[in-house]
């Protein structure tokens, strides 16, 4: 694995890779740009061509080409490795890519072939023309039909099956991807017949399943038929259109989540790019985690019927637990409060302006729910009021962040004239009931991890090690002044120890990765040190000053410690220890 990662790094320049996403400005020997991973005006995102690393001094993110690529594309490391390997022509050991690589690859190709086959049929077969007309009648332009690779599955018993067999795929493979069903006497029959087909693709753009709508409605044939769960198609992990929408989602920092793929297609045709669908009923945890790679803000826009409301609430429920900012887009209503359009698709067709306003007015789910409850006049009697408050509290309870919870408790208290204390008591009881440990009041989990570990690191020792790495010629001097036990951070101390023992006569050092390879160095700290070495100005003579500060801090600290130790030893009448401590005390005083 290490060798292929290194090979890819050797072949792919980080500056070139980043430039594919946004322009970089030269700044000395480095490059800079506004950070794509947090909102900012002045650029604090730096790229070092010589070190092949990047770092953002605003949000603290950073790393190498892999961390950049996984973050910007929202991929797992393994996926990124596969894509970049392909791109750079590096062969990966199969043991690392997951054993059945060949098998899966073949199945993806099989599905791609089936998709092409359906596309051919919609363009050429006579019934395909009918399918085209149906789509055009529904207002889907030819361009969008092509963009989403709409196709047609012929009426015939096993035309697709025979075609795939002729392409050297085996019956078990074709069954495995869900394209055929086995009838009595073992005959394989095409699962989709006389249907308008739309491919369902995973986040990497592989076709993993299909949705099919019947062209000529028949009594015993379902109107809509989707691929079953297969080796390739895990329904709880596929988000429709995420492969196309992810860049727009990151750019807009919000994802619009709708119920079905027709809504997605309608919105895309109306110029909305950041839209995805769960392709089932409610969103699953895995789907939410996939979308969360690109944004923390979800705008739900489900149908206005009861089923839609229910699906929204279930999706929001999980999203809130994941710390997502869940908002609701409410489609335009008439003066009596009745929905004017049944779904987003209809809305954007008939009233694109109204759609735009609805998106702009999207409101946080808790606010939406509260307003909805109040509209139903729940305050009229204590029973309905209590019921409502409990319903809303159940959602507030899902929010992992205590500050955010506090915000909504205050809001609910005001809206429903209930005392905040009582609401908190109710929340606490609910939590105990769920046996959920209380989270201490902290910043949101997203930014929390960065700030927490950052404050953990001693800034003096951080500057000290950075300065040594920038000017290796000062290691010799430092080793005479600062012992490694004077450095309190265990990681930095271990690295310092290594520098003193192996590099005190060196004027240049191996790469940071090589240096810390033998130490179990904290990855986050390693990345930040590496970035500081690359991007911060080095000052000649800085090391000596830092040595003096570390020494004096150690001196103060140790003197205090020795006083306590001496007092304890005296109390225990341990004369030997007392004199030992005394000796050290006097020695350090002269330091
Ligand atoms: Zn940043």
Image: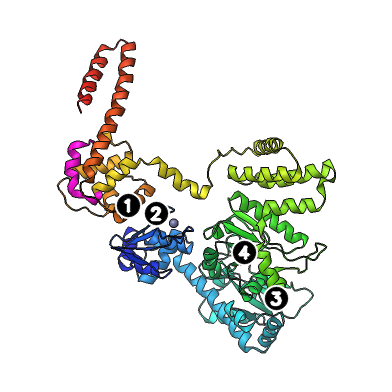
Q: What residue would you read off at disc 4?
A: 256
Q: Left or right: 164 with respect to 519?
A: right
Q: Position of residue 51 (x, y in %)?
A: 29, 59
Describe the element under mark 3 as helix, strand or loop: helix
**Mark 4 crowd level (few <14, some 14–19, many ≥20, 10 Å Cα):** many
Q: Is mark 2 within 8 Å of ligand 1?
A: yes
Q: What residue would you read off at disc 3?
A: 349
Q: Left or right: 220 with respect to 27?
A: right
Does 473 lie within the magenta span?
yes
Q: Left or right: 157 with respect to 42?
A: right
Of discs 4 and 2, which sits in the foreground?
A: 2
User: In this orientation, which residue lies closer to the viewer: 512 or 465?
Assistant: 465
User: In this orientation, which residue lies closer to the viewer: 34 or 441?
Assistant: 34
User: In this orientation, which residue lies closer to the viewer: 172 or 122?
Assistant: 122
Say which residue appears at 56% left-offset and 66% top-offset: 242
Q: CA distance from mark 2 to mark 3?
A: 44 Å
Q: CA distance from mark 3 to mark 1?
A: 52 Å
Q: Earlier in the sequence, mark 3 or mark 4?
A: 4
Task: Tell me, for residue 57, which label it has, or none.
Answer: 2
Say which residue appears at 66% left-offset and 63% top-offset: 280
Describe the element under mark 2 as helix, strand or loop: loop
Q: Is residue 369 visible?
A: yes
Q: What residue would you read off at disc 1?
A: 532
**Mark 2 crowd level (few <14, some 14–19, many ≥20, 10 Å Cα):** some
């Amino acid at each position: 694995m290490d060798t292929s990662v290194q090979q890819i790094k050797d072949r792919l320049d980080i500056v070139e890779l980043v430039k594919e996403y946004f322009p970089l400005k030269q700044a000395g020997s480095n490059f800079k740009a506004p950070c794509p991973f947090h909102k900012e005006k002045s650029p604090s995102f730096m790229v070092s061509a010589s070190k092949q690393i990047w770092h953002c001094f605003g949000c603290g993110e950073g790393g190498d080409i892999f961390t950049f690529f996984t973050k910007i594309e929202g991929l797992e490391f393994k996926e990124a490795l596969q894509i970049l390997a392909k791109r750079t022509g590096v062969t990966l050991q199969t043991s690392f890519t997951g054993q059945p690589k060949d098998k899966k690859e073949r199945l993806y190709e099989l599905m791609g072939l089936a998709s092409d086959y359906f596309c051919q049929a919609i363009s050429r077969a006579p019934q395909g023309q009918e399918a085209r007309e149906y789509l055009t009648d529904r207002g889907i332009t030819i361009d969008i039909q092509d963009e989403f690779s709409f196709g047609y599955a012929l009426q015939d018993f096993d035309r697709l099956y025979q075609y795939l067999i002729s392409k050297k795929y085996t019956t078990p493979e074709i069954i495995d991807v869900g394209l055929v069903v086995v009838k009595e006497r073992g005959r394989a029959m095409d699962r989709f017949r006389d249907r308008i087909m739309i491919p369902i693709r995973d986040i990497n753009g592989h076709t993993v399943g299909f949705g099919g709508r019947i062209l000529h409605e028949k009594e015993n044939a379902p109107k809509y038929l989707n691929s079953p769960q297969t080796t390739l198609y895990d329904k709880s992990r596929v988000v429709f259109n995420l492969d196309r929408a992810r860049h727009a989602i990151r750019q807009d920092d919000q994802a619009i989540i709708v119920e079905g793929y027709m809504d997605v297609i309608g919105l895309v045709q109306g110029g909305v790019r950041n839209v995805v669908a769960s392709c089932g009923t409610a969103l699953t945890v895995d789907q939410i985690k996939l979308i969360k790679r690109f944004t923390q803000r979800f705008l739900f826009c489900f149908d206005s019927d009861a089923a839609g409301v229910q699906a929204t609430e279930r999706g929001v429920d999980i999203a809130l637990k994941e710390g997502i900012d869940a908002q609701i887009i409410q489609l335009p209503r008439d003066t009596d409060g009745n929905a004017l359009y049944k779904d987003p698709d209809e809305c954007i067709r008939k009233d694109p302006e109204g759609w735009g306003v609805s998106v702009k007015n999207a409101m946080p789910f808790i606010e939406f729910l509260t307003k909805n409850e109040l509209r139903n006049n729940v305050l009229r009697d204590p029973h309905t009021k209590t019921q409502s408050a409990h319903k809303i509290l159940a959602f507030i309870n899902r929010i992992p962040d205590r500050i955010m919870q506090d915000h909504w408790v205050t809001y609910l208290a005001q809206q429903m004239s209930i005392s905040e204390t009582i609401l908190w008591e109710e929340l606490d009881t609910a939590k105990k009931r769920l046996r959920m440990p209380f989270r201490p009041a902290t910043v949101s989990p997203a930014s929390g991890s960065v700030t927490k570990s950052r404050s953990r690191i001693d800034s003096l020792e951080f500057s000290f090690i950075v300065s040594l790495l920038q000017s290796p010629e000062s290691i010799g001097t430092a080793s005479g002044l600062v012992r490694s036990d004077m450095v309190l951070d265990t990681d930095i101390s271990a690295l310092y120890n290594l520098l003193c023992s192996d590099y005190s006569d060196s004027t240049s050092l191996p790469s940071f990765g090589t240096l810390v390879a033998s130490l179990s160095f904290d990855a986050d700290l390693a990345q930040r040190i590496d970035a500081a070495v690359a991007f911060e100005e080095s000052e000649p003579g800085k090391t000596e000053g830092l040595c003096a500060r570390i020494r004096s801090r150690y001196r103060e600290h140790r003197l205090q410690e020795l006083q306590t130790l001496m007092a304890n030893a005296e109390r225990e009448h341990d004369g030997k220890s007392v004199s030992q401590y005394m000796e050290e005390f006097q020695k350090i005083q002269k330091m």
